[in-house]
Image (spheres, rainbow, N blue to C red):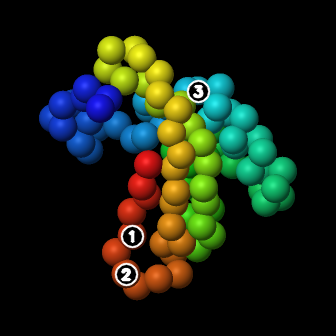
């Protein structure tokens, strides 16, 4: 759907690298206020809640390889408090 080859992204980039930078900044500011702690824009803004065992659902704009933008809903399960394998799904 996004047009990236696995060889171009696996172990090379994070979801934050193909997300709207302004949305990442806004999300970090909102989470920082909500959780009374400083959260940096970027990958930390996407996984902060899940890494602490808090389920997180949010909407995000992602860029395709063709520079087209897609809105999507992301759900990060509570991964810090379970023994089951976990993964963020978008």
Residue tagged by mark 3? 21
Label 1 to label 2, Cα distance in Å? 6 Å
- N-terminal-most mark, 3 or 1: 3
Return the residue at label 1. 86
Tell me whether circle 1 and circle 2 mark residues in contact (CB < 8 Å): yes
48 sits to left or right of 74: right
Q: Is residue 32 left or right of residue 67?
A: right
Tell me the element at label 1. Answer: loop
Count of numbered marks = 3
Name the residue carrying label 2.
84
Q: Residue at 25% x, 26% y: name it.
A: 3
User: In whole angstroms, how far apart are the C-alphas of marks 2 and 3?
Assistant: 31 Å
Res 44 visible? no
41 relative to 15 in the view: left or right: right
**For the residues marked 3 and 1, what is the alpha-carbon distance in whole angstroms?**
26 Å
Q: Residue at x 58, y 27 (%)?
A: 21
Extreme-top residue of the structure? 67
The image position of residue 71, as x and y in percent, is: 53, 32
Residue 35 location, quadrant = bottom right
């Amino acid at each position: 759907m996004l047009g990236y080859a696995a060889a171009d992204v696996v172990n090379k980039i994070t979801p934050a690298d193909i997300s709207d930078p302004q949305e990442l900044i806004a999300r970090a500011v909102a989470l920082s206020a909500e959780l009374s702690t400083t959260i940096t824009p970027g990958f930390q803004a996407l996984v902060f809640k899940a890494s602490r065992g808090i389920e997180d659902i949010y909407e995000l704009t992602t860029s395709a390889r063709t520079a087209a933008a897609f809105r999507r809903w992301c759900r990060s399960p509570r991964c810090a408090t379970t023994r089951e394998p976990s993964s963020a799904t978008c």
